[in-house]
Amino acid sequence: MTKTTATAHTNIALIKYWGKKDAQLNLPTTSSLSLTLDKFYTTTTVENSDIDQLIINGQMADPNRVHHFLDGLRTELGDFSPLLISSQNHVPTAAGLASSASAFAALTAATTRHIGLDLPLTTLSRLARRGSGSATRSLFGGFALWQAGTNDQTSYANALPTSNIPISLLVVEISGLQKKISSSDGMLRAMTSPKYEQWVHDANWQITAMQTALQAGDLTQVGQLAENNALAMHALNLSAKDRRFTYFTPQTIQVLDLVKKLRQNGLIAYATLDAGPNVKIITHADQAAYIQAQLHQELPKLRVTIAHPGPGVSYEQ
Ligand code: PMV
């Protein structure tokens, strides 16, 4: 029986997606820009089966989200046989990295290839979006820009021109994860913040400024823009009118303080955070090991992984 396998890497947004214009199609309120990482990825194998089934890391998973996603593909691409999907997530448990980005990118690539289609990456990106917004960007290596677009046809990501910027990203895993608020629920709440309109306004110029900084190889500017954007996203959560909340824990604040201290000591270190308490530190590739050692000295219990720009989607037969 033929099997088709695809691998996609996870990505971290430097300018975030945080709000939906259309929750069914995952159409975002703003464009977003990300870096795909080498260290964390999902490998997914699909084969024909009697019913749609999903196995993640060897365990049967809740099939609802995937059924819904596959049915969407069937409506758009034509019917295809039920599939047995086996996924291996190479994302450290509790890292708080969104494995949904790499998972839906790999699933879209493996499924479309399995049913005999050879689609452009931008089409795969558009299809992957319906599973998880951040998956649009995981089809591409390096930096990717997800254009918000205005409808299902126009909302997808593209690779940005290669930048030789010597960037590294340290992923700091914070223990004692608080109860998770899903990104979809978090976005709904954040959109009730009185600051939301300003967020949308700022994203427009931040996307352009970030591209300029990447092309110029200006890592300090990249870091500053990314940190400001991430903290503004988390300020929306704190200022939501409806069910305000935070993903931060006391240790998140400790790491943010340490990042500031590293900067005061002349290092390039800027923080970004997603839908969880973990901190990712943007730095120069030459400074990553030193920063890792500093973190270890001050907060020895936290695991820190150094990641670099990673590749786009790939296949094996
Ligand atoms: O598409 P989701 O549900 O994985 O949401 C992603 C939300 C953030 O990670 C916080 C931001 C982003 O752009 O990836």
Image (tube, rainbow, N blue to C red):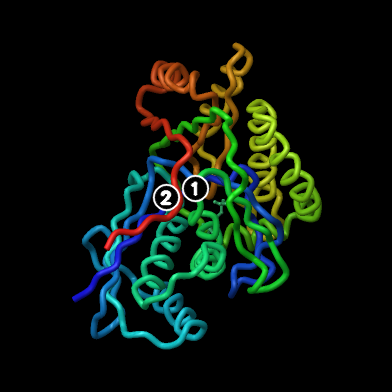
Q: Nearer the viewer, residue 58 or 145?
A: 145
Identify the image quadrant of the C terminus: bottom left
Which residue: 40% across, 78% down?
Answer: 67
Q: State the separation of the CA atoms marked 2 and 1.
A: 8 Å
Residue 205 falls in which quadrant of the image? top right
Which residue: 63% across, 56% down?
Answer: 146
Q: Label 2 crowding class (10 Å Cα cut-off): few <14, some 14-19, many 20+?
A: many
Amino acid on which disc 1 is placed: Gly
Task: Say which element carries label 1.
Answer: loop
Task: Say which element carries label 2.
Answer: strand
From the Cβ of disc 2, is ligand 1 less than 8 Å away?
Answer: no
Dot 2 or dot 1: first in sequence order is 2
The image shows residue 76 at horizontal and vertical percentages of: 52, 83
Q: Residue furthest bottom?
A: 79
Which residue: 49% across, 47% down?
Answer: 141
Which residue: 54% across, 30% down?
Answer: 167
The image shows residue 169 at horizontal and vertical percentages of: 49, 33
Mark number for residue 141? 1
Amino acid on which disc 2 is placed: His
Residue 49 falls in which quadrant of the image? bottom left
Mark number for residue 9? 2
In contact (CB < 8 Å): disc 2 and disc 1: yes
